[in-house]
Amino acid sequence: MSNYTLKQVILVRNDLKLPRGKLAAQAAHASVEATLRSDAAIVREWRSQGMAKIVLKVDNEKQLLSYFQKAKDDGITASLITDAGHTVVEPGTKTCVGIGPDDEHKIDFLTAKLKLL
């Protein structure tokens, strides 16, 4: 496993203009959920490497769902976060996607066109 660097990417919908606290909570949900769905050996190795995470922005729900599907199609663990709607967005709003942890090259190939949040 340690022959390559692992990282996780969190995709956040930029069109929702979430308040910072809400955005941080949603990104944390995406990170935790993707981690819990990941292979334990990969998570252990990722932890030993410092648990690198990058937060990127997508334009809208359609783009968020597209990247979620592409990650799954590429065999990369991914989690889609749907908000309960108790605060600033409507119930069922898809806010974030967590991708990985996995080989940074696989994730970069998938998300290279996206910009940092």
Image (cartoon, rainbow, N blue to C red):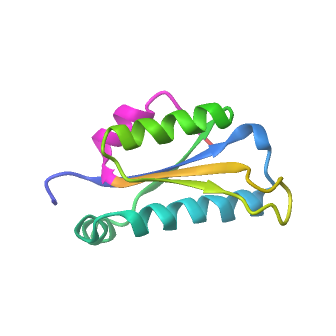
The x and y percentages for residue 62 are 63, 32
Residue at horizontal 59 percent and vertical 38 percent from the top: 64
Residue 115 is at least partly visible in this image: no
The residue lying toward the viewer, choosing from 46 and 65, is: 65
Left or right? Give the position of 1 relative to 50. left
Q: Is residue 113 above or below residue 92?
A: above
Q: Is residue 73 above or below residue 18?
A: above
Residue 60: quarter of image: top right
The x and y percentages for residue 5 are 26, 53
Left or right? Give the position of 88 relative to 74. right
Q: Quadrant of the C terminus?
A: top right
Residue at horizontal 73 percent and vertical 53 percent from the top: 92
The x and y percentages for residue 80 are 55, 52
The x and y percentages for residue 71 are 40, 41
Question: Over which residues does the magenta segment extend?
Answer: 102-116
Left or right? Give the position of 30 relative to 74. right
6 in the magenta segment: no
Name the outermost residue toward the top. 113
Residue at horizontal 76 percent and vertical 61 percent from the top: 22
Name the outermost residue toward the front. 92
Residue at horizontal 15 percent and vertical 59 percent from the top: 1
Number of callouts: 0
Residue 106: quarter of image: top left
108 in the magenta segment: yes
Residue 73 is at least partly visible in this image: yes
Q: Is residue 29 above or below residue 107?
A: below
The residue lying toward the viewer, choosing from 15 and 112, is: 15
